[in-house]
């Protein structure tokens, strides 16, 4: 009996040690590659000063082209938007950008309907992409608040790094292997951080147009504004086009706002209700640029 | 409580420590088994504990009465009551709605619309397993193969023994009950073999079955949009899912029992290496197939008679076996397909052809053919209805959809690679053990280390699935 327990513990500690080392190696490789955007921001950028960055979800990714803005204005622009993210993660991404030693004069925050008044306190599907940086205080603080899962694989990733591998396995193992072979590979984004939905995905019909009144009262918005201003930058809040939705955000003092929720009405510009195809993205980006000068000069 | 859950990871070490601390106090040890079994089962829904207790009380009492009674008529009555109680529980909780709906559907077919109401009863987890286990006890006592027990603690523990309570193996009283009578001594080698088996089962469940489920579910739910290759892949993946899931559970159950000093019967012996459907059923869910052999097939005549008579008996067993799995026509068709696959066997038997004369290539072809037939039957088993299963199979030939469900998602592509790699590894390991004449996979320490790392890094912990056989 004693031998059974002793040997069991011996093997258990041995396995946990090997798993710990492998997981740490995995994080090291991912963190030093460009596979996911957080890693790209930390180690894949050619320079650390930008005129503008765009943070947001897949809606920001499908509506604004950093490459197009760069070509049309000559400014350096980076799109930091990630799919499957909400406002808390956008804030984390903005923090990560600045804390990694980068700077941007203007921070554009693409805001979604779900985050206008409040945000859910839960971990997002893409939040694991910050795992290689879980040693940083801002990432750890984020995981502490939002990782409400039973095991807490993200918030405990410092002590037991392999637990997140158990939960996100292929989403961490593949980047680890890919990062070993080709550290410069970027997953579903180009050097400007852009990704587009092809035009062949365009819709053919639209639903009935709906008007919604909402206050931009999410307290995280204020936190982001304070943070961005402390970094010596300006925040612009942007509401990307919806197919059959017009949002009236009312009066929100102190926020630079570009509301293009009802900008495009033709379904051929949309892949679905909330995402634009490439042709829609071009139009939305041009309209954004026109509006931006006005907002920044106010 | 799932073997793969955090709760169980806390529950079992506590039970293990207390259990072996009480090794000198046999009654206290038995009481601990009973209590922990009830906690384990009650974790789902404590109200259903009453069914286990009711079934245990009924069969314990009937067993004692059968032991005292010598009048054949009264003995028949007593065993009839046991059948009524156990099959009655199954009938009410598992089949009532099915019969009500089928009855109404039959009348509607003749143009008669009648109103009805279903009970919408929640199916108690593992009811088909423990009712069959207790039933085997009274049947064996009735046949005089077993002496009735007077040890109520041992009998109740036998009925509710938590490692195998909810998904088998369906133990016989003649094999398991006696193990509760005497104190157990800790056997190091036996416990280590239990750990090895448990880890192998865990691997099959978490890496193969649950990862496969994340692919199988969307394929079967959207089968009309898939092309032939995806549909074929869906059927093969389900074959590995259900095998990893069910045999994984059995391995874990047997492994846990060994750690507690018990010996459970073998439930799976590398079934996808079977060379015929007959061979398959000697390897798949052995505890159920042998149950049906002993308590149904042989009593209705078995193979003592003409080929036609034997074939009729085989068909009866498979139809009942299909129905045992669930109250749905899909399971009955699944049983029918397996039954029909015995036709070539009976024809061969009448021509006195022997398998031993077949070449290696011929045996390999037989193995592949058997696997494909089993996969075909699994399509019915997995589908929501028989018509859906036929539509799924016709989609294989029409090839009208696309493979986007897999190809458009990198995550699914990666999961597919993991499942296929793990399944190939499993089959190679099983082939190797079969060649050595072994019945179970007991990996050496370094192999276990790799398997544990495989579980930690490739296990589907983010989308764990319930064990499929819990619903039966």
Image (cartoon, helix red, strand yellow):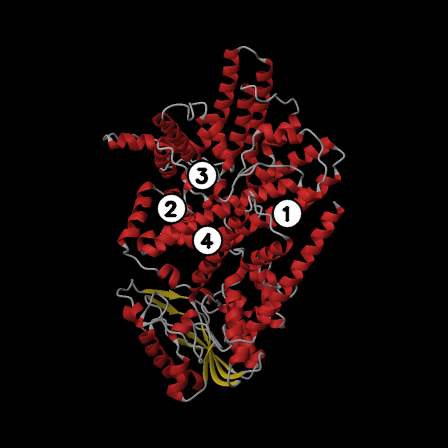
* Residue drawn at 57 percent across, 13 percent down: B69
Residue carrying label 4: B212
Q: CA distance from mark 1 to mark 3?
A: 29 Å
Disc 4 versus disc 1: nearer the observer: 1
Q: Which of the chains bears the disc numbered 1?
A: B
Disc 4 versus disc 3: nearer the observer: 3
* Residue drawn at 74 percent across, 37 percent down: B22
Disc 1 versus disc 2: nearer the observer: 2
Residue carrying label 2: B369
Where, quadrant-wise, is the C terminus of chain A in this rendering? bottom left
Where, quadrant-wise, is the N terminus of chain A in this rendering? top right
Q: Which of the chains bears the disc numbered 2?
A: B
Q: Which of the chains bears the disc numbered 4?
A: B
| Residue B122 as seen in the image, left or right of residue B401 | right
Residue carrying label 3: B279
- Residue A8: assigned label: none
- Measured as percent of width and height from the top left, residue A285 is found at 36, 79
Q: Residues within 10 Å of mark 3 (few under 14, many from 20)?
A: some
């Amino acid at each position: 009996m004693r031998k059974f327990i002793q040997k069991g513990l011996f093997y258990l500690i041995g396995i946990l040690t090997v798993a710990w080392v492998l997981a740490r190696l995995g994080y090291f490789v991912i963190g030093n590659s460009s596979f996911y955007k957080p890693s790209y921001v930390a180690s894949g950028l050619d320079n650390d000063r930008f005129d503008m960055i765009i943070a947001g979800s897949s809606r920001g990714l499908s509506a604004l082209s950093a490459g197009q803005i760069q070509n049309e204005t000559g400014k350096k622009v980076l799109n930091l938007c990630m799919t499957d993210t909400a406002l808390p993660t956008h804030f984390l991404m903005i923090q990560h950008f600045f804390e990694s030693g980068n700077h941007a004069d203007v921070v554009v925050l693409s805001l979604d309907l779900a985050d206008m008044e409040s945000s859910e306190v839960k971990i997002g599907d893409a939040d694991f992409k910050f795992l290689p940086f879980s040693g940083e205080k801002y990432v750890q603080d984020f995981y502490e608040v939002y990782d409400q899962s039973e095991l807490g694989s993200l918030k405990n990733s410092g002590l037991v790094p392999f637990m997140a591998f158990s939960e996100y396995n292929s989403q961490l193992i593949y980047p680890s292997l890919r990062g070993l072979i080709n550290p410069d590979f970027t997953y579903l984004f180009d050097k400007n951080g852009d990704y587009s939905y092809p035009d062949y995905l365009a819709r053919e019909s639209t639903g009935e147009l709906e008007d919604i009144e909402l206050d931009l009262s999410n307290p995280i918005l204020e936190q982001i504004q304070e943070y961005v201003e402390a970094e010596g930058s300006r925040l612009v809040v942007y509401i990307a086009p919806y197919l059959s939705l017009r949002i009236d955000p009312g009066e929100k003092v102190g926020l630079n706002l570009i509301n293009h929720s009802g900008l495009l009405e033709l379904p051929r510009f949309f892949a679905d209700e909330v995402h634009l195809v490439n042709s829609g993205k071009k139009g939305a980006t041009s309209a954004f640029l026109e509006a931006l000068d006005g907002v920044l000069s106010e | 409580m799932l073997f793969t859950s955090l709760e169980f990871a806390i529950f079992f070490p506590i039970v293990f420590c207390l259990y072996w601390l009480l090794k000198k106090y046999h009654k206290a040890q038995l009481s601990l088994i009973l209590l922990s079994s009830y906690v384990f089962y009650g974790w789902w829904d404590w109200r259903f504990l009453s069914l286990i207790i009711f079934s245990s009380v009924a069969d314990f009492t009937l067993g004692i009465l059968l032991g005292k009674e010598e009048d054949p008529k009264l003995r028949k009555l007593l065993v009839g009551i046991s059948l009524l109680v156990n099959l009655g529980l199954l009938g009410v909780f598992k089949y009532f709605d099915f019969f009500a709906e089928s009855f109404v559907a039959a009348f509607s077919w003749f143009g008669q619309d009648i109103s009805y109401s279903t009970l919408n009863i929640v199916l108690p987890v593992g009811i088909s397993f423990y009712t069959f286990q207790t039933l085997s006890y009274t049947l064996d006592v009735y046949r005089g193969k077993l002496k009735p027990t007077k040890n109520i603690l041992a009998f109740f523990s036998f009925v509710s023994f938590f490692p195998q309570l909810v998904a088998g193996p369906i133990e016989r009283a003649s094999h398991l009950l006696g193990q509760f009578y005497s104190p157990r001594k800790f056997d190091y080698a036996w416990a280590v073999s239990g750990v090895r088996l448990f880890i192998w089962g865990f691997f099959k469940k978490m890496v193969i079955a649950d990862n496969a489920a994340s692919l199988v579910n969307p394929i079967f739910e959207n089968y009309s949009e898939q092309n032939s290759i995806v549909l074929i892949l869906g059927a093969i993946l389900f074959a590995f899912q259900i095998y990893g899931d069910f045999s994984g559970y059995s391995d874990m159950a047997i492994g846990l029992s060994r750690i507690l000093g018990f010996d459970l019967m073998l439930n799976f012996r590398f079934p996808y290496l079977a060379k015929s459907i007959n061979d398959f059923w000697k390897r798949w869910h052995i505890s159920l197939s042998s149950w049906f052999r002993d308590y149904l097939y042989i009593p209705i005549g078995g193979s003592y008679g003409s080929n036609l008579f034997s074939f009729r008996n085989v068909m009866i067993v498979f139809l009942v076996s299909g129905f045992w799995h669930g109250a749905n026509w899909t399971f009955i068709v699944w049983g029918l397909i397996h039954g029909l696959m015995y036709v070539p066997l009976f024809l061969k038997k009448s021509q006195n052809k022997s398998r031993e004369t077949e070449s290696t290539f011929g045996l390999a072809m037989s193995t592949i053919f058997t696997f494909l037939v089993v996969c075909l039957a699994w399509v019915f088993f997995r589908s929501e209805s028989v018509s859906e299963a036929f539509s799924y199979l016709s989609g294989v030939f029409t090839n009208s959809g696309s493979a986007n469900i897999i190809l458009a998602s990198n995550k699914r592509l990666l999961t597919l690679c993991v499942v296929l790699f793990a399944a190939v590894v499993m089959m190679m390991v099983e082939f190797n053990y079969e060649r050595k004449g072994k019945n179970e996979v007991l990996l050496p320490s370094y192999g276990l280390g790799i398997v544990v790392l495989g579980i930690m890094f490739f296990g589907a912990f983010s989308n764990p699935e319930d064990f499929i056989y819990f619903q039966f």
